[in-house]
Amino acid sequence: MSKFWSAIVHELTPYVPGEQPKLTNLVKLNTNENPYGPSPKVLAALEAEAADSLRLYPDPTSDRVVQAVAKFYNVPDTHVFVGNGSDEVLAHTFHALLKHDAPILFPDITYSFYPVYCGLYGIEYQTVALDGEFEINVDDYKRPNGGIIFPNPNAPTGRGLPLAEIERLLKANTESVVVIDEAYVDFGAESAVGLVEQYPNLLVTHTLSKARSLAGLRVGYAIGQPHLIEALVRVKDSFNSYPLDRFAISGAAAAIEDRAYFEETCRKVVATREALVKELQALGFVVLPSAANFIFARHGERSGAELAAGLRERSIIVRHFSKPARISDFLRITIGTDAQSQVLVHALKEILTP
């Protein structure tokens, strides 16, 4: 604490990112990074960008990325906003579209950055409990609100909400913005982008960190009707007019344009996920249905804390959430390569053997 702090700083509880340990022979399954590197076309684009042009500012509107996203989803350029990772896109969304008199709504078990944004921007919120199967019940959101946001698939549960349910939610909340955070949608859930033209209150956010293997470049985007995009641009240009550097613009455009590589790596991750689920179930784990590049699992006889500690002793890092209590026995396990899955399964067999 310091006397020089602004008043708001004293009240903030910052987001705690996934651990980035520096251990030898580490099997890192805690931050939902893609186990496969980016498209070779991305690497070529980055190499080409290392030139004298770095002395110049990047394009403040990131038009190459905007156009690539628009073409990929078959939407107008005016429907796309680009930012420095989806976290920045989400931050601008909270500031520009979710700060109203009524509280916003999001699940009680979800992306833990949401309450942090609310604290930063002074936004009131209410959490809506997931049901007994850790699913989102749309009917629970039929109450007055200043906006609704949740990931689909949800995090850390991995459960996806059918598109029909999202549309039902939109029809029931026409007076507030509904934000669908699709960070993991490419691994098996239904995207809501196709509903954007029909619903003026829908904003869909995406990241290139997961399915396109670009966590290190920090690129995210939102898709919505122009009146929503304009609000994000106004906040962005009051904060940072150049959110994407030249490398990020070139790499992101190349990644989005290489549809074949994107689809191939997604298929590989999904195949590994399904195989790992079967192996964990054989070891006595209950695994929630996942449409993401991670699974959420608990063992019938061992606590989550015990299993996480045992894996760490074997240089395997997974994510364990001690709060809230009803998920304290779960582990969130990122889907790695087939080889990493086998290392994980072998380690769990050792831990579970009496």
Image: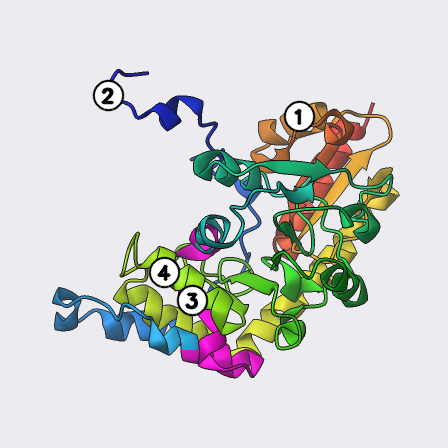
Whether residue 69 is in magenta: the answer is: yes
Q: Do the residues labelled 3 and 4 touch (CB within 8 Å)?
A: yes
> What is the secondary structure assignment of the residue under circle 1?
loop
- Badge 4 marks a residue whose secondary structure is helix
Neighbourhood count class around disc 4 (C-alpha, 10 Å): few under 14, some 14–19, many 20 upward: few
Q: Position of residue 348 (x, y in %)?
A: 73, 35
At label 1, the amino acid type is Ser
- Considering depth in this image, is 233 or 131 the residue closer to the camera? 233
Question: Disc 3 and disc 4: Cα gap in Å?
Answer: 6 Å
Q: Quadrant of the N terminus?
A: top left
Q: In this view, does 95 lie above or below 285?
A: below
Secondary structure, mark 2, is loop
Q: In this view, does 61 lie to the left or right of 285?
A: left
Contact? badges 1 and 3 (CB < 8 Å): no
Task: Report which residue position mark 2 lands on.
Answer: 4
Q: What element carries label 3?
A: helix
Residue type pointed to by label 3: Glu
Instruction: Give the mark nearer the N terminus: 1 vs 4.
Output: 4
- Mark 1, residues whose alpha carbon is within 10 Å: few (<14), some, or many (≥20)? some
For residue 260, say whether it is visible.
yes
* Disc 3 target residue: 230
> Residue at horizontal 45%, vertical 80%?
77
Q: Position of residue 49 (x, y in %)?
A: 24, 72
Q: In this view, does 61 lie to the left or right of 34?
A: left
Residue, disc 4:
234
The residue at which mark 1 appears reads as 322
Which marked residue is nearer to the observer: mark 2 or mark 3? 3
